[in-house]
Every structure is written in structure tokens, then in C-alpha cells.
Image (cartoon, grey):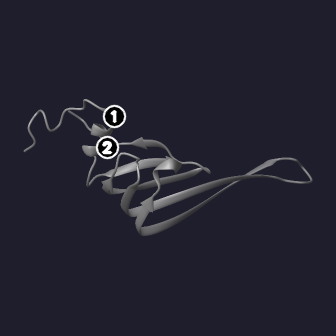
Amino acid sequence: MATEEESAVKEPLDLIRLSLDERIYVKLRSDRELRGKLHAYDQHLNMILGDVEEVITSVEIDDETYEEIVRTSKRHVPYLFVRGDGVILVSPPLRTS
């Protein structure tokens, strides 16, 4: 069982440290979203995720009607290295007290 000091959030990266071996949500540039198990990270937010579901959203404009066409594509990746400079947001799993 973790001590109170080990489970305390004092710095922003502490929240990510507490999410190791848990499923997290990562929003990336280029309208990409990832959900996967966090295996490792560093201070630049480079991350190694396992059992990853990637969702890519693209918006196109129809030439004739000028309507927006939103397309999403999904893929599953067993392991993925995420470069930190593309990370916009990291969300830890929901915890209940």
C-alpha cells in the first residue's frame, strides 16, 4: 500500500507518475486522441503506451455544398511511443475516494 507522501500530488508530473500502469487519455496535435496504458514517461512527456486505441478526426469541406464532412478513423496499436512535443493534454484515470 502506498504511503500518503507517495500518493501526494505536489507537482504536475506527479499526477502522471500516479497514473503509471493505468489507462490514460492523451490529446495530440493534428486532431489525434489516444487511450492506453501508461508504461513509462519522462520530463518532456515522451510516453510509452500499451494497448492503445488511436482516434484520428479529420474535417473536410464538400466542394459543391460547402458542408463540413467529419471523418473519424480508429486503430489499435499494441505499443506506441508518443513524442512529448505533440502532446496537448494528458488526463489520468477517474479516481473515486
- Residue found farthest to the bottom: 78
Q: Tags 1 and 2 in contact by the CB under 8 Å rule? A: yes
Quarter where residue 2 is shown: top left
Q: Which mark is residue 51?
A: none
Judging from the image, what secondary structure is the residue with disc 2 in? Answer: helix
**x, y percent for residue 27:** 50, 47
- Residue found farthest to the front: 43
- Amino acid on which the number 2 mark rests in the picture: Ile
Relative to 9, is 87 above or below? Answer: below
Question: How many neighbours does mark 1 have within 10 angstroms: few (below 14), some (14-19), or many (20 or more)?
Answer: few
Tally of numbered tags: 2
Q: Say which quadrant the C terminus sits in.
A: top left
**x, y percent for residue 93:** 32, 44
Question: How many neighbours does mark 2 have within 10 angstroms: few (below 14), some (14-19), or many (20 or more)?
Answer: many
Relative to 96, is 17 above or below? Answer: below
Quarter where residue 78 is shown: bottom left
Q: Which mark is residue 16?
A: 2
**x, y percent for residue 72:** 62, 57
Mark pair 1, 2: CA separation: 7 Å
Horizontal side, residue 62 vs residue 31: left or right: right
Q: Please name the residue that numbered disc 1 is placed on.
A: 12
Horizontal side, residue 60 vs residue 94: left or right: right
Quarter where residue 80 is shown: bottom left
Nearest the viewer among 82 and 77 is 82
Judging from the image, what secondary structure is the residue with disc 1 in? Answer: helix
Q: Residue at x 42, y 48 (%)?
A: 25
Q: Residue at x 24, y 32 (%)?
A: 9
**x, y percent for residue 59:** 72, 51
- Residue found farthest to the top: 10
- Amino acid on which the number 1 mark rests in the picture: Pro
Q: Say which quadrant the N terminus sits in.
A: top left
Horizontal side, residue 77 vs residue 6: left or right: right
